[in-house]
Structure formats: structure tokens, C-alpha cells
Amino acid sequence: MTMRRLTRIWAAQEPARDFADNVMAHIDRERRATARRKRVLHLATATALAAAVALTAHFGSEWWRPRGDVHARVRAELRLAGGARALLEPGAHVAWNGADVTQDRGEATYAVEHGSTLRVHASGATVELDDGRIRVRARQWTAGGSMSGYREPLGALGPVDTTALIAVIDGRAVVSGANGSIVLEQGEVATVAKGSVQRSGDPTEDEDRFDHDTKP
């Protein structure tokens, strides 16, 4: 079969009039879709980065770890082991290892769900909470008797002593000190000084006194 005959059989077809327009429109649609995907990816990355920066600003780089040390500059929530949580007020200083916390200054509220145990050490006493919420307030005093406040580093003004006030918001807590242990029910308050625990006879009066004594 000659080439001329083949050419007659399979004659070249002219492309449709809108062929080029369709090709360019398809390319343009693909380009716009790619640009949208890139914008979504950039937005998601920026959002995740902003969240990480905000968490670091609140808690420092170790906020999520099972142990750490935090001096709260703003009100912040701290996740502890076993589902326990701590709400730190500005100025609170806590160090933790799992669900074992030491608080030497400021105010913090702790919450524990049934099935786990939280231990908070303050002023030489230990509070154990299995289910419920407690509020712990700690202050520091120098050996000379003046209050060091919430802003100075521990020991900056000389040897430091601490006192604490422990209030049970709901549930029940066991507070142990050098003079033994007491059980606090909902609404009850205990004060701690030099490791000795004393049940409050008038919770409202003791909290008011603590507020007055801790004012700078």
C-alpha cells in the first residue's frame, strides 16, 4: 500500500475550533487549584505554629512533659499525670514530677478525677487528693520576718520559711504534717506553718487573714 493511499485513508483531522481555548482553561483551573492547596497548607502551618508559641509563652518549653518547673506570669492551666490538672494564678511557682507537686508560692487550684491520686507539698506538709478540688496558697517569709512576696527568687532575701493555707472546694483531702494528719471535707480549711498542720476554726476569717498578711 502506497503512502498516498494511506494518506487518503487516514486523512488528518483538523482540531476543534475551541481546542486551544479548552486546553488553556484546563491549565488555568489546575493552576488555581494548586494555589488554593498551598494557601490552605500555609494557613494550617501558621495556625499550628501560633498555638505552639502561645503554649510555650504560658508554660515554658516543658509544660507538656511529665515533670517540670513553672513560675506562672499569667493565669495558666497545667496538665499533670493521671488526668490531674492545676490552675495557676499569676505569681504561683510549682515544680512537679508526675502527680507529685511542690508549691512554694502563690495560689493554685488542683482538680483530680476519681481513680488517681495527687500529692501537693507546701510548707512542709503534704496534701493527698483522690477525687475533688483543692486550693493551695503559699507565701514566703525571710528569717527576719518580712515577707519575700511572689516575685523574688526563693532565698533571694536570705533564709526563707513558708506558710500555706489549704481549702477543700469539693471532695475530701488528707493533710499530713510534722504533728500528724487531718482529714478535710468540703468547705474546710487548714493552715500550715513550719510543717505543722492546724484545722481552721473559722475558714472565712483565716482566709481573710491570709489575704491581708500576703499583701505586699
Image (cartoon, rainbow, N blue to C red):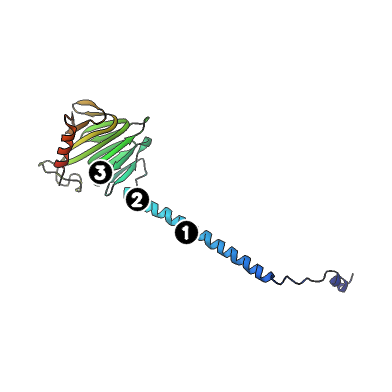
Q: CA distance from mark 3 to mark 2?
A: 16 Å
Give the quadrant of residue 134: top left
Instruction: Name the mark on residue 56.
Output: 2
The residue pinned by badge 3 equals 93
| Left or right side of 199 for 17 | right
Mark 2 is on which residue type? Answer: Thr
Residue at 26 percent across and 40 percent down: it is 108
Looking at the figure, which quarter contains the N terminus? bottom right
Residue reaching furthest to the right: 1
| Left or right side of 68 for 143 | left
Q: Earlier in the sequence, mark 3 or mark 2?
A: 2
Depth check, front residue: 65 or 181 = 181
User: Disc 3 vs disc 1: Cβ atoms closer than 8 Å?
Assistant: no
Depth check, front residue: 160 or 127 = 127
Q: How many marks?
A: 3
Residue at 43 percent across and 57 percent down: it is 46
Residue 7 lies, in percent from the top left, at: 84, 72
Residue 183 lies, in percent from the top left, at: 25, 26
Q: CA distance from mark 2 to mark 1?
A: 21 Å
Say what secondary structure mark 3 lies in: strand
User: Disc 3 vs disc 2: Cβ atoms closer than 8 Å?
Assistant: no
The residue pinned by badge 1 equals 42
Instruction: Name the mark on residue 58.
Output: none
Q: Residues within 10 Å of mark 3 (few under 14, many from 20)?
A: many
User: Measured along the vertical axis of the image, is residue 37 above or below residue 64?
Assistant: below
Mark 3 is on which residue type? Answer: His
Which mark is nearer the camera, 2 or 1? 1
Taking the image as drawn, is residue 136 in sight? yes
User: Measured along the vertical axis of the image, is residue 145 above or below residue 44?
Assistant: above
Say what secondary structure mark 2 lies in: helix
| Left or right side of 82 for 30 | right
Say what secondary structure mark 1 lies in: helix
